[in-house]
Amino acid sequence: MVTVERGALATVGARVARVAPAHRYAVLSDTTVAGIFWPTVLHSFGEKAVELFTIPPGEHHKTRESWAMLTDQLLAHGYARDTTVVALGGGVVGDLAGFVAATYMRGVPVVQVPTTLQAMIDASIGGKTGVDTPAGKNLVGAFHQPAEVIIDPTVLESLPPRQLNAGMAEAIKHGVIASAEYFRLVSQPADMADIIAGSVRIKTEVVARDVREGGLRRVLNFGHTIGHAIETLSRFDLLHGEAVAIGMVIESRLAERLTLAERGTAEAVCAAVGRSQLPTALPAGMRALDIVSLTHSDKKVRKGRVEYALPRAIGAMAGADTGWGIAVDDDDVIATLAQD
Ligand SMILES: NC(=O)c1ccc[n+]([C@@H]2O[C@H](COP(=O)([O-])OP(=O)(O)OC[C@H]3O[C@@H](n4cnc5c(N)ncnc54)[C@H](O)[C@@H]3O)[C@@H](O)[C@H]2O)c1
Ligand SMILES: [Zn+2]
């Protein structure tokens, strides 16, 4: 279940106790988020037994070492099976705390309380948890559905604008893959609670129809094949959402080139991306060959051709007959990148 409600953070303790009652509650967070919201969260638990455990902020703390540290702290504090974990933070905390909960005593409930737009509309929905390893991102993890996702849109007021815009990339993606109406909403100034609610609905529906990623869930990869390559080549100077924004523009051009997408699709995507102050073009000096070569290290390669999730129009994806993946020749990708 997902709740989107202004001010929900002030009653988060009671809500958690209702959906996942436990003897003790462990709130996992990062030091930045805890510094802002812990007093409110602590207060919301009233007399209940609740403690805070933190990691420093940042993707490079989404590791097995952080998982071991948090797990050892819970063990040292005597947390037993009747524990509920609360993940308070962005996607880094959500993935890590979700993985701690998935494995602690073979699994205890987790409630996700996302505090970034990215985590509200993407990372907290769908039950994927895990950590990064030196070999790559998200390579070790588990599916562990949250007992509830509690979203308070007002917590975004303290989020740096760059992080907020990056989150909008996933909202735009949801419009492209599933709903022209929602795409129109995110293409103009709109109420943040409406943006979140619409995005949550789309992601929840896609996930519900394909819980363990057999097919349909692949449409969520739109913008991400090129986006991941750009993110890596930027040495993570670009935020994930910024790289995905550029990826969506290029992949929708690719879809038009392959005559899969209606003409004008790429232009509409580009305009929406630009309106959210997100980049639409490749960073200077990034080479098409390097991008294409990196797309091959992604998981979705079939007989040497990389599979993409590509739009048919705004609000509809191509590839229903091929499991939503479309194998593309490198030459077409290179030609599309050269357009940029
Ligand atoms: N599980 C999934 O399905 C899924 C999907 C997408 C992304 N992810 C993961 O999500 C992670 C990225 O998440 P993210 O973009 O939320 O980054 P993040 O968790 O690193 O948060 C970004 C920064 O914002 C700070 N912050 C968070 N909330 C704040 C607030 N309300 N006010 C002020 N500062 C705040 C954090 O301390 C951090 O420094 C990646 O690790 C990615 O792999 C997972
Ligand atoms: Zn993404």
Image: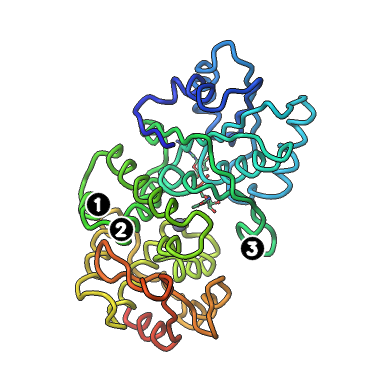
Q: Three-letter amino acid code at disc 2?
A: Ala
Horizontal and vertical percent for residue 43? 52, 15
Tell me the residue that label 3 is attached to. 136
Relative placement, left or right, of 204 versus 148 is left
Element under disc 3:
strand
* Residue 114 on image: x %, y %: 47, 38
Q: Which secondary structure lies at badge 2? A: helix
Q: Which of marks 2 and 3 is in front?
A: 2
Mark-to-mark CA distance, 2 and 3: 29 Å
Q: In which quarter of the image is residue 280?
A: bottom left
Question: Disc 1 marks which amino acid?
Answer: Tyr
Label 2, residues with CA under 10 Å away: few <14, some 14-19, many ≥20: many
Residue beneath disc 1? 182
Q: Is residue 71 left or right of residue 224?
A: right
**Residue for point 22% across, 49% down:** 185
- Of labels 2 and 3, earlier in sequence is 3
Task: Count every numbered label the image shows and give the total.
Answer: 3
SS label for mark 1: helix
Who's the residue at 54% across and 43% down the image? 145
